[in-house]
Image (spheres, rainbow, N blue to C red):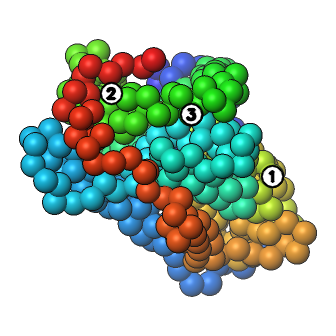
Amino acid sequence: MRGVTGVTEPGAVGRQAGIMTAAPPQACREKKAYRKKAGKDRSQPVRRAVQVAFLLLNVWIGAEFYLWVRAFETGGAPIVSRPPGVEGWLPIAGMMNSKYLFETGRVPAVHPSAMVLFLTFTGLSLLVRKSFCGWLCPVGTVSEYLWKLGRDTFRRNWLLPRWLDIGLRSLKYVLLGLFVYAVGSMSAAAILQFLQSPYGIIADVKMLNFFRHLSVTAAVVIGLLVLLSIFVQNFWCRYLCPYGALMGLAALLSPLRIRRNAATCIDCAKCAKACPERLPVDRLVQIRSAECIGCLECVAACPVEDTLDMQLLGVRRRVPAWAMAAAIAVIFCGATGWAIHAGHWQTHVPAEVYGELIPRAREFSHP
Ligand code: SF4
Ligand code: SF4
């Protein structure tokens, strides 16, 4: 294992063996006259603002949900209502309900917002690349802060050797395949039966309880993931997250792409070094990879005017960070606003049913 200050130096990655960090910044490979970028790049402050806003939204939803659950556990009257947004943390239920909708044409009564959010985030990836991972996902945000903490503390992140990196990256697609197979083999009737079972109705409460009453094994696994995330950039997202795998596959159809102008590029490799997904931005004209999270770190790092941008295919129009943020906000708020207006946001389960099931949550296991 070797450690070198900094992050990715693309040429070094394939050459070195063992877990390692990248080489120091590479000098420009070719001296070329260039026009320096005018003005400060604001893509990262814009993206961070969106990330933090969504993280805070999730913290708020989590706190409200906890208070709501505690009220039923203690026999009191809830002082808050159940936040439907908590169902964003039930992607499998979202996938099941989407299948139910496509098969029957009906919106399910239990966890409809899981479906709305699942379809919204998939649609977001179809339009604005894998921006769910790079701009919205709270796990992605925490993961990013962890590896940045690791880099700032130890002045390095580890890069796994390419063969291991590629092998591990396939894990998330295998996991996605298993979930798609499991959900795909369920009939609409079986999905309805599952989600209307006691376990299905309080799947969100079971998830909360999983984190509230962590078993030793779960605590060790989560601790290990946190530790690895400090040293390896986006460990969970990069290797294990099936949701991210799905978003990446959807993003292959996105009309947005990072594009490099080879004529003005000075081959400094700063873009590739900045890319948290280790994509060889400095050697490609377009980034089509399912791994690109649309974070614009490469664009921010490029020192040359009009050389590296997120662009809209066909018209070759530059898409600035504020436009990506606006598109994400419009799609997210539009979809959730429509669902609220159409009555497809709240789970329609009487309070008495929750009162009966939540205190006995431990008794219900996966059917
Ligand atoms: S290519 Fe650019 S936008 Fe895509 S993940 Fe890498 S740094 Fe982010
Ligand atoms: S695209 Fe920009 S950052 Fe990347 S190698 Fe060319 S000049 Fe350097």
Quarter of the image holding residue 97? top right
Q: In this view, does 221 lie to the left or right of 9?
A: left
Which residue sits at x=63%, y=29%?
189
Task: Point out the tag, 2 or 1, that comes first from the N-terminus.
Answer: 2
Q: Residue at x 51, y 47 (%)?
A: 109
Q: Residue 300 carries which label?
A: none
Residue flagged by tag 1: what amino acid is it?
Leu
Q: Is residue 199 above or below residue 138?
A: above
Classify mark 1: helix, strand or loop.
loop
Please tell me which of labels 1 and 3 falls first in the chain.
Answer: 3
Q: Name the residue under label 3.
A: 192
Q: Is mark 3 on a helix, strand or loop?
A: helix
Say if disc 2 is inside 8 Å of ligand 1: no
Cα separation, mark 2 vs mark 3, equals: 32 Å
Q: Which residue is drawn at 47% across and 40% down?
A: 90
Percent position (x, y) of residue 124? 65, 59
Whether 130 is drawn above or below 352: the answer is below
The residue that label 1 is drawn on is: 253
Measured from the top left, where is residue 325 in percent x and y? 56, 71
1 or 3: mark nearer the eye: 3
Mark 2 highlights which residue? 222
Residue 100, picture quadrant: top right
Q: Is residue 29 left or right of residue 347?
A: right
* Disc 2 residue type (three-letter): Ile
Question: Where is residue 72 drawn, in percent x and y?
Answer: 17, 43
Q: Are marks 2 and 1 in contact (CB under 8 Å)?
A: no
Where is residue 82? Give x, y as percent: 31, 54
Count neighbours of disc 1 (C-alpha within 10 A) and say few if under 14, some if 14 to 19, many if 20 or more.
some
The residue at label 1 has a CB less than 8 Å from ligand 1:
no
**Residue 143 visible to an observer of this rendering:** yes
Judged from this view, the residue extending furthest toward the bottom is 39
Mark 2 surroundings: few (<14), some (14-19) or many (≥20) residues within 10 A:
few
